Image: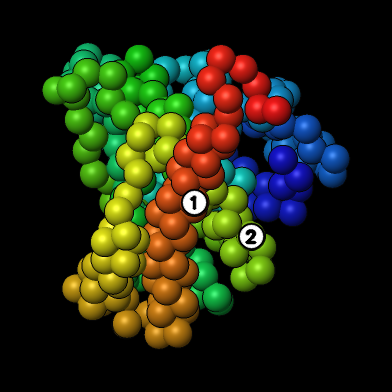
Amino acid sequence: MNAASELPEALQSVQFCEDILIVDSGSTDDTPTVARQHGARVLHKDWLGFGPQKRWAVEQARHDWVLCLDADERVSPDLEQSIRQAFQAQCIALENDPLLAGFEFPRSNFFLGKYLRHGEGYPDYSRRLFHRMRAQWSLDEVHEKVEARLPEAGFQRMNGDLLHHSAESLQTYLNKQNRYTSIQARHLVERRQIPGWGKVVLSPLTRFIKFYLIRRGFLDGLPGLVHIAIGCFNSFVKYAKAIEISKSEQADKATTPRGGDPS
């Protein structure tokens, strides 16, 4: 939605694909026009949430092998070459191997003026190229992922980076993270996975140790520190929001008269 400024580079990077499909959820800018100018089919679908929206999009594709990108992502030349080589050299095997659900490749995140190469921002392996009869998007409203339909099916790793080049400001990024943590907190409550205060405190700490120290996020300088700090804070806020929602719902139940609505 409203991705006219980001689409040209994304669409140019997938011109090697036989069918390019854009699913739009109601843009008020030139997104549909820009998409058609780059040879894409444009379909409208009211927003369902990230997972359901992407699953619907995959169902509209003309081929079983699908490559899924967001508007702020680009296929690097190295990744394009890997995809071409895989399908030229293994076309028959790819079609006839039911246990090959798809491929995953590293995603390089552009943050505060540079591509992150360590920590949480890289390699960030992403499953984006898959056979839709063997894999599908999860139905998560946020942080959706591609899952194999069969437990024994798997994904092969492919060389070349998927470039995540978001043009959003830090304020926009933080606003988005606030929305995401609210959705995640609600899901935790719905699944009755209410965290204790120990997890609220320890989760961001272990996250920092893992990504900043063990996976050397410090090598990405200030952008790496800011990126990981936000990720740790998101972990803290997600669990804190879940506790708040749970306590609020418990309080509502306690004040509701049995057998009737609140007076």
Residue 66 figure quarter: top left
Task: Describe residue 118's horizontal placement relative to residue 156 as left or right.
Answer: right
Q: Which residue is mark 2?
A: 175
Q: Quadrant of the N terminus?
A: top right
At which x and y percent is residue 19?
56, 25
Residue type for callout 1: Glu
> In the figure, 98 relative to 125: above or below?
above
At which x and y percent is residue 194?
35, 44
Q: Secondary structure at mark 2?
A: helix
For the residue pair 255 and 162, the one nearer the viewer reads as: 255
For the residue pair 107 and 205, the one nearer the viewer reads as: 205
Front disc: 2 or 1: 1
Which residue is drawn at the image coordinates 27% and 45% (left, top)? 158
Residue 94 figure quarter: top left
Task: Describe residue 238's horizontal placement relative to residue 203 as left or right.
Answer: right
Residue type for callout 2: Asn
Which residue is drawn at the image coordinates 46% and 77% (left, top)? 226
For the residue pair 98 and 205, the one nearer the viewer reads as: 205
At which x and y percent is residue 245?
51, 45
> In the figure, 175 relative to 230: above or below?
above
> In the figure, 74 relative to 63: above or below?
below
Which residue is drawn at the image coordinates 46% and 43% (left, top)? 246
